[in-house]
Amino acid sequence: MTSLATSTSATEAVTAEPHEGHADLRLFGLATFLVADGMTFAGFFAAYLTFRAVNPLPAGSTYELELLLPSINTMLLLVSSYTFHRSGRNLLLGQMGPCRAWLLLTAGLGAAFLAGQMVEYFTLPFGLTDNLFASTFYALTGFHGLHVTLGVICILLVWFQTRQGGRVTSAAPFGLEAAELYWHFVDGIWVVLYGILYLL
Amino acid sequence: MPIPSSLVTLLVGMALVLSGLWVGYNVNLLPLAASANAPVYDSLFRVLFIIGTILFLGIVGLVVFSLVRFRRRAGDQTDGLAIEGNLPLELVWTAIPAIVVLFVGLYSYDIYQRMGGMSSLNDHSAMHQMPAMETMEASVTGAEGAPDPAARVWGGIGTGAGETNVLPVEVTAMQFAFIFHYPEGDITSGELHVPNGRPVELRMKANDVIHAFWVPQFRIKQDVIPGQPTVLTFTPTKAGSYPIICAELCGPYHGGMRSTVVVHEPDAYDTWLLKNSPVKATVASAPSTPTA
Amino acid sequence: MTVASPNDFQDSLQPQGWLRYFSFSLDHKVIGIQYLVTGFLFYFIGGALAGVIRAELASPISDFVSRETYNEVLTLHGTVMIFLWIVPVVNGGFGNYLIPFYVGARDMAFPRLNAVAFWMIPPAGILLIGSYFITGAAQSGWTAYPPLSLTTPALGQVVWIVSVLLLGGSSIFGGINFIATVLKLRRPGLKLMQLPMYCWAMLGTSILVVLSTPVLAGTLLLLSFDIVAHTGFFNPALGGNVVVYQHLFWFYSHPAVYIMVLPAFGLVSEILPIHSRKPLFGYTTMVYSILAIVVLGLVVWAHHMFTSGTPPWMRLFFTIATSFIAVPTGIKFFNWLATLWGGKLALNSAMLFSCAFIVNFVFGGITGVALAQVPFDIHVHDTYFVVGHFHYIVYGGTVFVIFASIYHWYPKFTGRMLNEDLGRLHFLLTFVGFNLCFAPQHWLGLNGMPRRVAEYDPSFTTLNQISSVGALLMAISSLPFLYNVLVSAFKGQVAGDNPWNALTPEWLTSSPPPVENWIGAAPLVEHPYGYGVDEDALSVEAATGRDLWSGTGRR
């Protein structure tokens, strides 16, 4: 009977690294998680579309959306996907300066998107509990906004880690690749959301 | 083996089918059948019961037989036969369930159509309302105005095409009671009274949470959903009193949310109607007036 | 307890002995056992709740607990049994323990995520159970249909939502881990079509988890907005639509049945060949039928809503789709029967529970096909017929398999055998009690007893009392089991590494296994069911097959 009175943290330090290394599956895992996350959105979209198909807008309630601001926002996100892509390419080429600059630009675009979203929230003629469609609108855009916020935070973290001596390097690009995959996913969801909420 | 195994299989199969048929025709698990739907339902039940009995007995028989016949004798350390599969056999038992469920599916579709499940809703949906239907409704319910989009019926079993002389009853479900209102005669009652042999159309709405209207002897059930009116049609065929049961969890007193449906002979129903109606004049004419 | 091998010592600084089971261990075997033990704790809690229900129903009037308490109890019973017992045990418990062995890995793909997934369960469970004592538990059933869930006491409902969200998250993390492990972590040379069947079952299950659980999470988020922020998604008084909730809820909760049942199919596929000394019959069709069940399982949810005012075309579609699930399921059952046929069946507890599973599940499956038929369902929907049906599926099906699996893998977990006599007694009591409890409920439902009631028509008293006696027998049956499991861990007959003479990879190492599963390289098992085939059925580098069983061939 061996009973080593070691603390848990000491244990983790030893076992955290795989005993014999296997391929890095973290991106695969993240992709699977994003499928799951996408299903949450799919559920919301399905609910919204069903509401639209069968529930009439109650008399006397407003549910009108302006197109200009969300269209600008869509452009911002699409461009940010491109800038993130540029950043990733720079990282793999070992060009840390441009990589970090593109990252910051991406984060800025994300923040601009969030600002635009806030402006829209404050200028809309309806509130969260005004009617079914208002609630669905805020739930969908809010849930997506939460994802964007998380994405911006992740980008800033990655930006911090790409500094001299940081964890993310061209040899270990996982942090940036993960954030990039996530960011493209969030953009993709927005495009669908834009189509369903604003254009349909 | 002296007897060819194909012959044994055939005999066992025949015995299974016979016992399934015997069980299906001689074991009654259902309550009294008191609506036009019920015998139709019961014939579906019988078919399912027979097929189910055959399958269940067959599979249990195989399991028990295997456990006895192929049990490991003491001291035997050898393996069984290394049979890893048999494509024709596997195809057979893919095909058998496929054919059985296809048959069951088509048959139950037919049953459902005979119960009125497939034909109903368009007739009642305000969006697709036909003029003939409208006049009929107007003549039955009295003074309903233009079709109202909010009056859309969302689900249930409606009257089949060509049904006439339908008795409409408005049902309101609430925690924890059903209230029945008869537009013919403006009666409000806590019990449902219906004449034997005449189609009854329940137009159901709920005030608070989801309830369900269930009469086991009629073999019908429909959720009563707040904000989404539903409809349920049945034709009682046996005089008597049957329980109305709420079948959807609706709160602490869900188990106590019960009422009674009383099926009268037509004369007795007219008497009941006369006795309870505050507006005697309309009652005398309404039930005997065939509409449309 | 024996130390698996001297290598343990140098390999690991993990807490040893019982302490590691309370740690944030990253070892898949420890996590598996953590899941199992936690699951069993909740099983006994859920069983006690069931006891309250059966005690209340022993008389036709509401006299044992208050009506509100009764609704709390039935809500907790459903939630605990599904989310804290069956799903964690058949997925997290056996999955974590077995899958790395089966794919020839040293651990799961994401060990830390794995530990996080497990440690989300105890807080969720404590929240759920604690809500009963502190705020009052949810009263709207495990389905939490609005508007009832909006009008019952809000705090209990919100705690319920938080708890289920945690459990759903745990389930999703587990699912991601299983998918990555099965698809990406296989030992070099091991092909997908050589994997033991449980891997396929867990792959299918995990796909269902990843695709459907998030929808439940989103739905419950919306429901919590309705409760907390007074939005009107599912509140008809505010223009909402209650049926949309039901669609979204069942989009998860029907696949949840397969999430509970597919792993059981996988476990049985492991147990039957070993104890009948025959290859698993029809491996390929088994795999395809799992995949077919996954695909069909995602498109049948609305058969729970035949009376909910769904349009006729929808009822027709879901009737047909649901009926066709019987086809792949039927294939699996016939294949199992063919596996038994001509074997050398050991009539031990694992085998008895597995065969009882076949019998129970066939019964539940037959009533299930009947329930898929709209006209049939319209009469028995929301009655005790349905209660009987799904207990035949989840208890008679999955829980019987869990017990079979405990008897089968206990020697692997502990290195000691369970007592067979106590095991057979446990089986007998469970089988009789189970059928006594749930078979009469079908008749009750057909004849007019709705589900979730605290009071009922007095003419149903006798059958309800029989059912309650059955429940009591089931409760008693857990005593020999508990005694057996607890005492055998210390006093059971020493099992040796491979007491069943099995070919699947988890038996090709010591019992209990060393921290990283194998001393040396993982064996390449190309024929996990190669019983009765030839000596080379199995190849571990140079060692030949059967030598491994006795342990003489291992270097």
Image: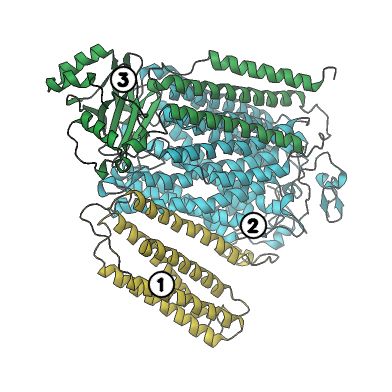
Chain colours: A yellow, B green, C cyan
Task: Residue C9: give x, y in percent of width and height.
Answer: 70, 60
Corner quadrant of residue A17 = bottom right
Q: Is residue C23 visible?
A: no
- Comparing C338 with C324, the one in front is C324
Q: Using residue C535 as the reference point, say whether residue C401 is left or right of it.
A: left
Which residue does the image show at 66% across and 57% down from the upper left?
A: C183
| Vertical order, B184 against A23 (above or below) | above
Task: Residue C109: give x, y in percent of width and height.
Answer: 63, 60
Disc 1 chain ID = A
**Residue bearing the label numbered 2:** C181
Kind of residue at badge 3 = Arg
Which residue does the image show at 33% across and 18% down from the upper left?
A: B242
**Residue bearing the label numbered 3:** B198
Corner quadrant of residue A168 = bottom right
Mark seen at residue A74: 1
Mark seen at residue A164: none
